[in-house]
Amino acid sequence: MQQVLNMTTEKLSRWQAFRKKLHDKYRLVIMNDSTFERKISFRLTRMNVFVVMGAAVMLLIVATTFIIAYTPLREYIPGYGDVNMQRELYHLTLKTDSMEKEIIRRELYLKNIRYIIEGRDFPQPDMKKPSDTSIHQYKNLNFNISPEDSALRNDIESIDKYNLSFSSGTHSDNSISNFFFFTPIKGMVVNGFNPAKGHYGIDIAANQNDAVKATLDGTVIFTGWTLETGYIISIQHSNNIISVYKHNSTLLKKTGDYVKAGDPIAIVGNTGELTTGPHLHFELWHNGTAANPKEFMSF
C-alpha cells in the first residue's frame, strides 16, 4: 500500500513539475548585433507559445478551406476543376459554330449583292468528282463464296422453281411481298423510312470497308456520283422493282451488268454532302412508289 502511495505521489510531482515548466516565464530579446542595443523584447511562456502556434495553424486551415470552397483560385488546384466547365465549353462550341455559319451566309449574301450590282453572272457550283484515291484499292478484291452461301442460294432457287406464286420466271401478281429479298448489308438502322420529310429509304450504319450486296437478281441501270449522295448504284429487278444504294466509297459494277441476289456491288463509304459517317442509304421502289425496306427484310 505504501508503495502504491509513493508511485502516485511521484506521478503527481512530475505532473506539477511539467505544469510549472509550462508556466515558466522567458524573455525573447531582439538586439542590435553591433551595438547590443535592445530593440524588441517579449515575455513568453511555453503555454503561450503552444496556444499561439495552435491558433495560427487553425487559422491557416480555415483560410485554406475558404479559398478552395468560395474563390476561383480552386480552379488552379490540380484535379479540382469547375463542374460547369464542360457545359460552358459545349455551349461556347455551339455558339462558335453558329457564328461561323452566319459569317459564311453573310459573305455569300454580300458576294451575291456585288454580282448583281456589277451585272455579272453568278458562278456555277463545282460539280467535279472528288479525288478518291481509295478506288484503286478495291479493284482486285476477292470475295470467296462459302459452301453455306452456295447451299442457301440453291435452296432459294429450288423453292422458286416449285412456288405456285411464280409463272414462267415472273410473278403472277404485282405484290412486292412475294419476293425474297437479300439483305444488302447488316447493321443498325440509324434513320428510318419517312417520305413526309423526303427520306425515301433507310440509313444503315456499317463499317467503312463492308461490301454492299444486291437485294435481288437484276440489271444495273445507273452508276454515278452526285454532290449530295456520293457514289450511287441502281438496279432494275423484275416486276418493276428498283433498288438504290447511295453514299458508297466505290462501285464494283458498271451500268449494264447483270447481278444475282447477294453479289457484291459496292463498298460502304461516306461520300456526298448528306452524310455524317460510314453508312448505306438503301431505297426500294415498286411501280414508281417508295417502299419501306424494313417491311421486307431484317437488318
Image (spheres, grey):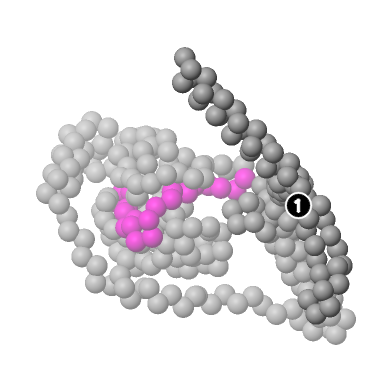
Image spot of residue 226 (x, y percent): 52, 67
Question: In the image, is 151 to the left or to the right of 138?
Answer: left
What are the residue bounds of the magenta stretch? 197-217
Q: Which residue is mark 1?
A: 26
**Residue occupying image coordinates x 70% and y 80%:** 123
**Residue occupying image coordinates x 73% and y 41%:** 23
**Residue occupying image coordinates x 38% and y 67%:** 250
Image spot of residue 281 (x, y percent): 46, 53
- Is residue 203 visible to the viewer in this orientation of the structure? yes
| Front-lying residue, 6 or 266 | 6
| Front-lying residue, 166 or 66 | 66
Dot 1 lies on which element? strand
Name the kind of residue labelled 1 in the image: Tyr
Image spot of residue 65 (x, y percent): 71, 46
Image spot of residue 130 (x, y percent): 49, 75
Instruction: Tell me if residue 208 is in the magenta stretch.
Output: yes
Residue 54 sits above or below residue 15 on the image: below
Residue 208 sits above or below residue 49 on the image: below
Q: Residues within 10 Å of mark 1 (few under 14, many from 20)?
A: few
Position of the C terminus by quadrant: top left
Residue pushed farthest front? 2
Residue pushed farthest top? 1
| Front-lying residue, 77 or 23 | 23
Instruction: Tell me if residue 123 is in the magenta stretch.
Output: no
Q: In the picture, residue 27 is in which quadrant?
A: bottom right
Residue 123 sits above or below residue 86 on the image: below
